[in-house]
């Protein structure tokens, strides 16, 4: 089993920045992909960004150029740096992890952290 704990969410004004962190523990040696999803009220959960063990990344079109995903292997932590935040970025952000490099459905999930962007 893998446990994921997110932190760093909060309230920020439009145009501001936040950095989310996700610390992984447990049976982490088999983990390949780690990603960030978000779910806004009344909307489906969507992939925001993902990174593989090898460092390959992909982003949702809506966040390209504003968000950056990174991974610290020594700390077993993945980060999401969010800049130029918009009110439409408001959502609960979830960290996810999986043994595969490009999973359609991630196996492990965190509890989520709220991000609220005020206009």
Image: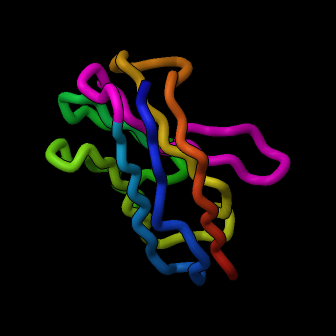
Quarter assignment of residue 81: bottom left
Q: Looking at this view, is 111 or 66 the one in front? A: 111
Q: Residue at x 41, y 23 (%)?
A: 98
Q: Looking at this view, is 106 or 111 the one in front? A: 111
Residue 115 screen position, x and y as percent: 61, 65
Horizontally, is 39 left or right of 9 in the view? right
Quadrant including the C terminus: bottom right
Quadrant including the N terminus: top left
Residue 95 screen position, x and y as percent: 49, 43
In the rendered image, the vertical position of residue 51 relative to residue 33, given as above or below? below
Q: Looking at this view, is 92 or 77 the one in front? A: 77
Magenta span of residues: 26-48
Q: Residue most toward the left? A: 74
In the rendered image, the vertical position of residue 8 relative to residue 74, given as above or below? below
Q: Residue at x 65, y 70 (%)?
A: 116
Horizontally, is 1 left or right of 85 in the view? left
Q: Residue at x 43, y 61 (%)?
A: 20
Q: Residue at x 47, y 72 (%)?
A: 84
In the rendered image, the vertical position of residue 12 relative to residue 2, given as above or below? below
- The number of discs equals 0
Per the image, is 15 magenta?
A: no
Per the image, is 43 magenta?
A: yes
Q: Looking at this view, is 21 or 91 the one in front? A: 21
Horizontally, is 24 left or right of 118 in the view? left
Residue 38 screen position, x and y as percent: 61, 47
Q: Residue most toward the right? A: 42
In the rendered image, the vertical position of residue 10 relative to residue 4, given as above or below? below
Q: How is the image coloured?
A: rainbow
Residue 106 screen position, x and y as percent: 51, 24
């Amino acid at each position: 089993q893998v446990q994921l704990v997110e932190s760093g969410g909060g309230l920020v004004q439009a145009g501001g920045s936040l950095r989310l962190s996700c610390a992984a523990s447990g049976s982490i040696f088999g983990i390949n992909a780690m990603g960030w999803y978000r779910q806004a009220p009344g909307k489906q959960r969507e992939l925001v960004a993902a990174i593989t063990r090898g460092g390959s990344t992909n982003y949702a079109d809506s966040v390209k150029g504003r968000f950056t995903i990174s991974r610290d292997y020594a700390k077993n932590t993945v980060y999401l740096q969010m800049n130029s935040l918009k009110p439409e970025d408001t959502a609960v952000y979830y960290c996810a992890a999986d043994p595969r490099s490009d999973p359609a459905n991630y196996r492990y999930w965190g509890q989520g952290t709220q991000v609220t962007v005020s206009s």
